[in-house]
Image: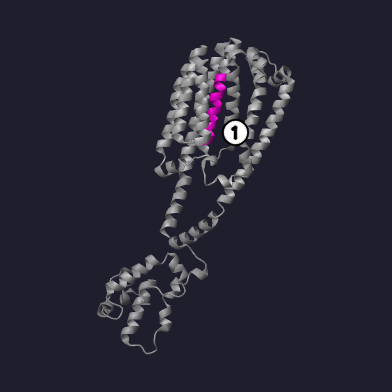
Amino acid sequence: MIKALSYYGPFAMEWYFCVLFCFLGLYGVLMMKSSFRRLASLVLMFSSMLPALIICGKFTEDMHTTQAMAVSLIFLQVLITATGLAVIRKTIPLKLFRNIKQKENEKEN
Amino acid sequence: MIASLFVFTAILIFATGVLVTGRLAFTVLFLSLTGVGLSVLFAVLGAWYAAAAELVLGAGLIPYLFHRVMIRLPKEVQEEKRDWVFPFQKKANRQQLPVSLKILPLSFLIFALISWFFIPVFFRSFSSFLVKLQSPEPFLNLLWETKKPDFLVFLIAVAALIFLMLADREETEAFSNRRNSATPEKEKNTAEDNNTHTGKILPEEVQPVRTAVIQPEKTQPVMETENSTEKKQTNVVAETGSENENISGGKTGKPSKAQEKHSQDANGTHLERKNRRFKSRKYRGTKKWKNENGTKDEGGNGK
């Protein structure tokens, strides 16, 4: 394992963390019940994949392709986050308001 | 190296903030921290365009969007969102944790093992994928040829992880169902109350309000004077709202000559009777009314 780490140079630990955080984000997307948490986990996945992409470009010495892919990924991340937040903004308050009204009715009775 | 360490510290803090504390303000803060750290790392590695894009969008726009959604939510919703505490932190729920949530550290260990074996495979295959981007070689074949044993271990670990996740999900749902088992009865009660408020058609057992107005006619004494018969008529008509308004006044609320004439009697003045009727209407929707429905008369009749 140490050989493998040394073979991939100074970026081995970054790779390890990238993959770890990617799986952590995947776990959050699959397991969390709150939609805010799911969206934040998705952003975590994107954030962990971006440095992996850039490090790959550095390793292969093809920074132009890598940068193009990274910028596309960032735009995609912003689009998905904005759409998800808009959907959450439309749906969540209605559900919670319904609960609040039920609580008020219970208090009155 | 310092920049990359800073980035991964920020990502680690962000992940911890999302998954452990889970508060929205912390999420916004750690999002912007992660964006700044990533842009620094990209700049160090020479990817200037990616650094600029990450700084503008990742550290600026995404936290701004989260923040906008958070401040637009009403206060009640924000208070509920503040309770985003992971179940491990709630002392009251600690005894009631589902079994599989206690296996969570084990699943994190599997994450670590997966990523350990995943590093060389993914790194080599992805870099060669970037190099051979022009060639139509399939990505999975490339992955298979690079390192077979690690790939097999990776597949087994992923299968174990999916199994753990599914088990955990079922346990969590069962746990939440057990915790919310008392809610359907409450909803049922509130639905019944809403029916009484909105005046929807109720079953026959709950309806005797309308007939209760007419009941005093049967219980009136046999010997009746003129006053008592007129009084009976006015009360019945006022409650049922019949069309005979010339005699009683009915829905309009204006007292007729007969009412004015007999306003001072055992039931009090006209205003007092009206107030009693109003109170009885307010009383109609309550639970007390539902319990005493068959025994108590409506107001306006003086019992």
Q: Nearer the viewer, residue B125 or B267?
A: B125
Residue B234 shown left or right of residue B201 in the figure: left
Q: Residue B50: in sight, yes or no?
A: no
Query: So how many labels did they put on this image?
Result: 1
Q: Residues within 10 Å of mark 1 (few under 14, many from 20)?
A: many
Based on the displayed image, in which of its 4 quarters is residue A24 positioned?
top right
Snapshot quadrant of residue A31: top right
Q: Is residue B218 left or right of residue B16?
A: left
Report the side of B66 relative to A22 (left or right): left
Q: Is residue B157 magenta?
A: no
Quarter-of-image position of residue B212: bottom left
* Front position in the image: B163 or B132: B163
Residue B286 is left or right of residue A55, and the answer is left
Find disc 1 in the rendering and name its residue.
A27
Q: Is residue A42 magenta?
A: yes
- Quarter of the rendering occupied by the N terminus of chain A: top right
- Residue A79, how many percent across, how many down? 50, 28
Q: Name the one closer to the observer, B81 or A63.
A: B81
Question: What colour scheme was applied to this rendering of the protein?
Answer: one colour
**Considering the numbered disc 1 on the image, is that residue within a helix, a strand or a loop?**
helix
What range is drawn magenta here? A37-52
Q: Chief secondary structure of the magenta span? A: helix
Q: Is residue B117 above or below residue A39?
A: above
Pinpoint residue A102: horizontal percent, then vertical percent.
Answer: 46, 53
B201 and B275: which is toward the camera: B275
Marked residue chain, label 1: A
Circle 1: residue type: Tyr
Whole-percent x and y of residue A36?
A: 50, 36
- Is residue B6 in view? yes
Q: Quadrant of the C terminus of chain A?
A: bottom left
